[in-house]
Structure formats: structure tokens, C-alpha cells
Amino acid sequence: MLKKILSVIGAYKLYEKWLWLQVKNGAKLEHIAIILDGNRRWALENELNPWLGHKKGAETVERLLDWCEKLGVKFVTLYTFSTENFRRSPQEIAEIMKIAEAKFRKLLTDERIHRNKVHVKVIGRVNLLPESLQQLIADVEKTTEDYENQFLNFAFAYGGRAEIVDAAKMIAEKVRGGELSLDDVNESMFEKYLYTAHMPKQEPDLIIRTSGEERLSGFLLWQSAYSELAFLDVYWPDFRLIDLLRAIRTYQNRRRRYGA
């Protein structure tokens, strides 16, 4: 049995290396966005409480950051909790918030974040989160606000429609106050009021969704206009480096015309 397991591990490592060699010399991705889907279903299939799926998924995020660093991906945006997710049971929401607090507390002193000068930002309606979590988020953002080597965004309490509505409200306030005229409002100006306005490259090259579902569920509605999409039939807690490499290989094999 042990011999068979070692054989499988060896085959996996060889496949991973082969994929890596294929991807490393292909088109480089600047911005990858991922919808981290399937935590609850993973927990259900493993006969665990739903929040244990979220905990396992958070561990997968840490591995993802290492992979993206090695691949030279500068911008990473992760869809972790939507505004619609507040409809879940109070107990599950409370457990998710506890997991988030633990992870953001760890980010404050994470050696990788400071060594690589990673700018961490939470995009979404942060005011809907518990005050203790809001404070932790503010501390992490303040600590990393001058970093520009990499950008790590957590879409938390996020909704794509909410983002567009919030941007429109801010612009309307400035028009009403005389700071802007209607003639000033165009696409490039509108982007300055999106949650992702802190990044030089807001548009993802590639958006990945795990769990087999094939929809964006409101993720980066404005920014995703020309993004390539990859839907993977794997739950987020089981996401592996080979899944990421295969998605990138698919991206590299596509011809991007941007309407031309």
C-alpha cells in the first residue's frame, strides 16, 4: 500500500514539474482573481461542520500565495465572502468571522508579506463586518499601504453590483457638490471610484472559479469585461498547484483579441 502511495505521489510531482515547464515560458499573467467556491460542499462530503471547510479553504489560500509568488503574479484578488453570504446561519457566519480574524492577525506579522512588500487590501462593504474584524483589517491595510511589489485583495462582504452602486453614489455626490461635472464622467474616471482603484491594473487577466459552478456570481462585474474565465471541477480546499498551472496553461493557449 505504501509503495502504491509513493508511486502516486511521484507521478503527481512529475506531472506538476511538466506543467511548470510548460507554463513558465508562456505569456505572463499580471492579475489572477479566484472565486474560492466549494468549502461547504467539501465539508459535507467529509462529514464535517461547514466552518471546517472554510478553515481548510483558508489554509489553501496560504499555499496559493506561495505559488503566485513563484509565478511572478503581481496582483491576486480572492472572492472570500459575498454580501449574499450574510444570509447563512448566524453560527456559520460567526465561525467564518473568527477564521478571518485569525488570518488577518497572522498577516500583520507574516514574514512573506513584509519580505515581498505585499500591499493587502479588503474590497467590499467592510462596515458590515464585526468591529473587531474591521479594526484588524484597518491595521493590516495601514501596515502594508506603502508596499507596491505585490497586491493581495480579499473581496470580503463584497458584491459586484454593490461596488458599482457605491462608485456611482460617490460620483453623484461630487457632481452635486460641484467638484465634478457630468461631462467629466466617463469609463476611465468611473474606475477611479471602484474598490480596486488602488491598483495600477484593476482588470484580471484570468478569473478562476472552483467547485464546478460556471458563473461569476457578481465578482468584479466591471473589471472582468475582457478577463479569461476558467471553471474547475474541484472544491477550493482541494485546490492544488497543478489546478492553478492547468488554468494558466489554458489562458496561455487562448488568443486574446479584445474585440479586434
Image (cartoon, grey):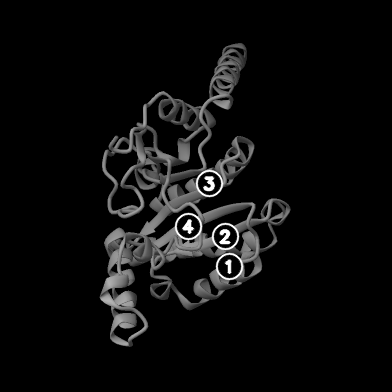
Q: Residues within 10 Å of mark 2 (few under 14, many from 20)?
A: many
Task: Identify the residue position indicated by label 2 in the image.
Answer: 120
* Mark 3: amino acid: Val
Q: Looking at the image, do the residues carrying marks 1 and 2 touch, with CB atoms under 8 Å apart?
A: yes
Q: Looking at the image, do the residues carrying marks 2 and 4 touch, with CB atoms under 8 Å apart?
A: yes
Task: Identify the residue position indicated by label 1 in the image.
Answer: 141
Q: Is mark 3 on a helix, strand or loop?
A: helix
* Mark 4: amino acid: Phe
Residue furthest toward the front?
183
Distance CA(mark 1)–CA(mark 3)? 18 Å
Residue 34 image-quadrant placement: top left
Quadrant location, the N terminus: top right
Label 1 or label 3, whichever comes before in sequence order: 3
Q: Looking at the image, do the residues carrying marks 3 and 4 touch, with CB atoms under 8 Å apart?
A: no
Foreground mark, 1 or 3, reads: 1
* Mark 2: amino acid: Val
Q: Position of residue 56 (x, y in %)?
A: 50, 46
Q: Where is residue 32 in the image (x, y as percent from the top left)?
A: 47, 43
* Mark 1: amino acid: Glu
Task: Identify the residue position indicated by label 4 in the image.
Answer: 154
**92 left or right, relative to 26:** left
